[in-house]
């Protein structure tokens, strides 16, 4: 077997990478990662230096791992700022570090891309290769962010400590339409959801669905302006630039969905989603101002409507947000895995993660108790 470190995704043949990545997770596609790098969103200047790993066996690509050298912890959505401070207080350097993730995309997906899903030798070679690279380049640590649950045993066996967190996902129970979905709510929660939707409808706001091939440059510029306005209200800029969206609109047209909100035929808000054959992923949202309940409608209800219409089984709207519970999203465990070169810090983090996992379990139990669903799912009409 031959392990190679690549300083650009462009150095890896697209067909070979995509054969490993599959079509379940659109943001693992070569086109997505290439657009991120070639538009400058992911680069050494941005603090994300590509260090992708590939593994060949007898000249054939059998495994790969998206990997980056990081000079900060921005855009990861698994927060280790306290770890970095602890290193600094101990007179040690936490950065650079190695991170296996899709930049700025907190969606669980495979990190160990395998031609044969049962090839544990290849998977272990990738993880060991990442650790060896960290040691060779004086990186403090290796972090695998948002892997699948199935990848955790191998990561543990390789010496990584597993960290637990929580997101909110929606699952399609083969609903015929949105109304049938609402029938599974308690009466009070169903009334609240209908009130949310009625406020938007009574304001004269209508929605259009646009797939990637239908989104021209002018529309992307408009969508990006909405997204930028919303980011700037929070004191930051979007992680991905306009060139990135223009690029993926062309290279991943079947995986891009924009839901455009219009009032009096004028666009006022937009949400950007990624779509796979089975799932919808909410990523970016923006509007030109405050409109009552419009965020919930555009980002959540319209997404659920789309999933029901297209038969998609899963909707992941992004990180955090307990307000999603009352709108039909359920708590879902998410994971990350961490290796630190410093043995004392690795031991300390192991103890911390055990306590944190207990807290996450309690949190999931607490928020799950606020679910809008009836216990029997029958949908009382009272």
Image (tube, grey):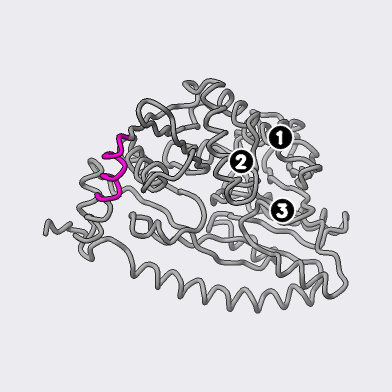
Q: Horizontal and vertical percent for residue 21?
A: 59, 39
Q: Residue at x 54, y 37 (%)?
A: 26
Q: Horizontal and vertical percent for residue 113?
A: 62, 44
From this view, report whether residue 140 is shown above or below residue 56: below
Gap between marks 3 and 1, in whole Å? Answer: 25 Å
- Is the residue under label 2 in contact with that under label 3 (CB below 8 Å)? no
Q: Which numbered mark, 3 or 2, is in the foreground of this view?
A: 3
Check disc 3 and report the residue beneath it. 99
Q: Horizontal and vertical percent for residue 368?
A: 37, 67
- Is the residue under label 2 in contact with that under label 1 (CB below 8 Å)? yes
- The region drawn magenta spans 194-204
Gap between marks 3 and 2, in whole Å? Answer: 22 Å
**Residue 115, disc:** 2
Q: Report whether 374 appears left or right of 76.
A: left
**Residue 60, disc:** 1
Of residues 207 and 355, the one drawn nearer to the viewer in this rendering: 207
Gap between marks 1 and 2, in whole Å? Answer: 10 Å
- Is the residue under label 1 in contact with that under label 3 (CB below 8 Å)? no
Q: Earlier in the sequence, mark 3 or mark 2?
A: 3
Splitting the image into 4 quarters, where does residue 188 fall?
Answer: bottom left
Q: Residue at x 63, y 47 (%)?
A: 104
Please, what secondary structure does the residue beneath circle 1 have? strand
Please, what secondary structure does the residue beneath circle 3 have? strand
Residue neighbourhood size for the residue with mark 1, other residues' Cα within 10 Å, grouped as few (<14), some (14–19), many (≥20)? few
């Amino acid at each position: 077997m031959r392990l190679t470190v690549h300083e650009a995704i462009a150095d890896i043949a697209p067909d070979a990478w995509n054969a490993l990545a599959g079509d379940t997770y659109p943001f693992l596609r070569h086109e997505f990662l290439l657009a991120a790098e070639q538009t400058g969103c992911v680069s050494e200047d941005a603090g994300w230096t590509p260090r992708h790993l590939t593994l060949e066996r007898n000249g054939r690509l059998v495994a790969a791992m998206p990997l980056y050298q990081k000079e900060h912890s921005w855009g990861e959505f698994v927060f280790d700022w306290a770890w970095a401070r602890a290193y600094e207080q101990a007179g040690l350097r936490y950065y650079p570090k190695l991170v296996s993730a899709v930049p700025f995309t907190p969606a669980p997906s495979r990190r160990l891309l395998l031609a044969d899903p049962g090839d544990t030798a290849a998977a272990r070679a990738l993880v060991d290769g990442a650790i060896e690279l960290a040691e060779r380049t004086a990186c403090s640590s290796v972090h695998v962010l948002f892997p699948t649950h199935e990848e955790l045993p191998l990561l543990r066996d390789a010496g990584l400590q597993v960290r637990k967190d929580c997101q909110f996902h929606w699952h399609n129970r083969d609903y015929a339409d949105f109304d049938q979905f609402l029938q599974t709510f308690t009466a009070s929660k169903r009334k609240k959801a209908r009130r949310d939707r009625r406020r938007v409808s009574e304001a004269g706001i209508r929605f259009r669905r646009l797939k990637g091939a239908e989104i021209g440059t002018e529309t992307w510029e408009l969508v990006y302006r909405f997204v930028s306005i919303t980011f700037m209200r929070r004191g930051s800029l979007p992680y991905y630039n306009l060139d990135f969206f223009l690029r993926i609109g062309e290279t991943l047209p079947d995986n891009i969905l924009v839901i455009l909100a219009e009032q009096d035929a004028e666009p006022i808000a937009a949400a950007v989603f990624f779509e796979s054959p089975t799932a919808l992923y909410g990523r970016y949202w923006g509007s030109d101002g405050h409109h009552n309940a419009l965020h919930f409608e555009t980002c959540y209800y319209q997404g659920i409507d789309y999933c029901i219409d297209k038969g998609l089984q899963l909707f992941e709207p992004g990180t955090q947000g307990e307000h999603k519970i009352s709108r039909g999203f359920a708590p879902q465990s998410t994971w990350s895995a961490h290796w630190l070169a410093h043995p004392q810090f690795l031991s300390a983090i192991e103890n911390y993660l055990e306590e944190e996992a207990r807290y996450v379990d309690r949190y999931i139990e607490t928020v799950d108790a606020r679910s809008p669903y009836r216990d029997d799912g029958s949908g009382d009409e009272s």
